[in-house]
Image: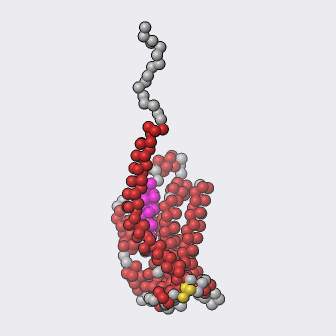
Amino acid sequence: MVNTLAPETTGRPAHTPAATEPAVDGRSRSRRRQATVAYLFLAPTLLFFAVFLILPLGFALLLSTSRWAGFDLGDIDPVGLDNFTGLFAAGSTFLAPILTNTLLFALGTVTLALAGSLLVATCIDKLRLQGLWRTLYFLPIVTTVVAVGNVWKYMYEPGGLVNGVLNALGLGSVAFLQDPDTALPSVVVVQAWASVGSAILVLTAGLKSVPESYYEAAALDGAGPVTVWWKITLPLLRPSLLFVCVTQFLTGLQSFALIIVMTKGGPGDATNVAALEMYRQAFSYGDWGTASAAAFVLFVVVLAVTLVQLWIFRRKGEDA
């Protein structure tokens, strides 16, 4: 008699560790191959950053603790922290007015550019031919800084367009770039005007990302335009505003070309900023050590301001 109670075989292979080893080895080889390919693709970029960023940064750090007149690397003379202490020593103009001017210039640029771009972006968001308006406001960005600076420099002259308008209104002429009290604000206005186009593009893109259903719900609740803008539009624009604020502030802190074209840092040191002082120390006075030390001080200021801005916006986002 056939034993029908014999254990049934399923035909499935036994699951043993040895059976999975080839698959694991295959996956490991595949990962290593993918990692190798990834590193090969990254190699040119890493080499670029090493040659044009890391090496110059290390060389600048070396120069900031040395005295060097340029050209001959054998003349590098280590001086420790003397270059840094010299920047803040009694009688030095780096802390005031140079670094103070830098912060005021950046703050003024951000304030005007942010306010102007937010106003313009809000206005053209509901207009027809938005592309045309954005293009017109973007034109200063694609115009060279030298051209922008020279045009505004002539407009600020005693016989220029701005003073012509003031005289027509009976307000009298103003020595915009010759008076220490008005020189820095005058250049700030030009910098804000030249950079407002890029901010408008960012903010208009942010406005387009606001869901239309929010506005429809607000209209059903009877909210007015000001309430809608304050309670809906502005909070949802926070990421775009953060980007504009940080980038404009960084641009302002590192501004150089516009100032050297319009005022060359004058009158006196009224418009002298950190980037211009670095240029003067290195190329006019041959003091590369002081110039490098000033560059690292500016780097610390830029980093600190950026972190503070990110912290403020993040805190506001959590409170919203």
Residue at 38% across / 66% down in the picture? 44
Q: Is residue 251 left or right of residue 92?
A: left
What secondary structure is the magenta-colored segment mainly?
helix
Residue 147: image location, x then y, percent: 37, 81
Q: Quadrant of the C terminus?
A: bottom right
Residue 128: image location, x then y, percent: 36, 59
Residue at 49% across / 61% down in the picture? 240
**Height in image: 47 above or below 34?**
below
Residue at 51% across / 59% down in the picture? 239
Q: Visible in this render: residue 281?
A: no
Residue 221: image location, x then y, percent: 54, 47
Residue at 48% across / 50% down in the picture? 215
Farthest residue, direction top: 1
Q: Quadrant of the N terminus?
A: top left
Q: Visible in this render: residue 159?
A: yes
Closer to us: 69 or 252: 69
Q: Is residue 262 left or right of residue 222?
A: left
Closer to us: 205 or 273: 273
Q: Which residues are magenta?
A: 193-209
**Height in image: 245 above or below 25?**
below
- Image-quadrant location for residue 77: bottom right
**Height in image: 251 above or below 153?**
above
Closer to us: 219 or 319: 319
Count the marks. Answer: 0
Whether the magenta-drawn stretch holds residue 195 is answered as yes
Farthest residue, direction right: 90
